[in-house]
Amino acid sequence: MSERRRDDQREPRDFIPDVRDGLTRAERVVIWQLSVLERERQGRNVPTAQLYGRVVEHVDMSVEELQRILVRLGARKT
């Protein structure tokens, strides 16, 4: 299993809001991967664990950070 980077080694650009709309790169990756997975699953709900696996391929973040982003973006349990 890969070792996680310490917080001081993370990419700051992933968590700085864009001036255009206030979304961070991490949030954009979450939205993008959620869209891809929804298409792959033919519109069915996407499990958070599956989304997390896709997101961490692009952005170093914890499960808690993903959950905070999902709440901020308006995700809800069904």
Image (cartoon, grey):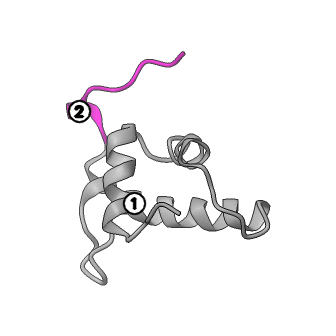
Whether 44 is drawn above or below 52: the answer is below
Amino acid residing under circle 2: Asp
Q: Earlier in the sequence, mark 1 or mark 2?
A: 2
User: Measured along the vertical axis of the image, is residue 62 above or below residue 46?
Assistant: above
Q: Is residue 34 left or right of residue 17?
A: right
Q: Secondary structure at mark 2?
A: helix
For mark 1, give the secondary structure: helix
Who is closer to the viewer here, 40 or 26? Answer: 40
- Per the image, the residue denoted by label 2 is 7
Q: Whole-percent x and y of residue 2?
A: 50, 19
**Is the residue marked by circle 1 packed among few (<14), some (14-19), or many (20+) residues within 10 Å?**
some
Residue 8 among those drawn in magenta: yes
- The label shown at residue 70 is 1
Residue closer to the observer: 48 or 10: 48
Q: Is residue 1 visible?
A: yes
What residue is drawn where x is 69% and y is 65%? 38
Q: Is residue 1 left or right of residue 42?
A: left
Q: Which residue lies at the image location 27% right of the left edge and 32% below the top edge? A: 9
Mark 2: few/some/many CA within 10 Å (<14, 14-19, 20+): few
> Where, by quadrant of the figure, is residue 5 drawn?
top left
* Residue at position x 36%, y 37% in the image: 62
Amino acid found under the numbered disc labelled 1 = Leu
The structure residue drawn at horizontal position 33% and vertical position 71%, both measured from the top left corner, is 23
Q: Can you give x and y, in whole percent of width and height, for residue 74 in the image?
A: 38, 71
Q: Which residues are drawn in magenta?
A: 1-10
- Callouts 1 and 2 close, C-beta under 8 Å: no
Total of numbered circles in the picture? 2
Give the x, y percent position of residue 17. Answer: 25, 68
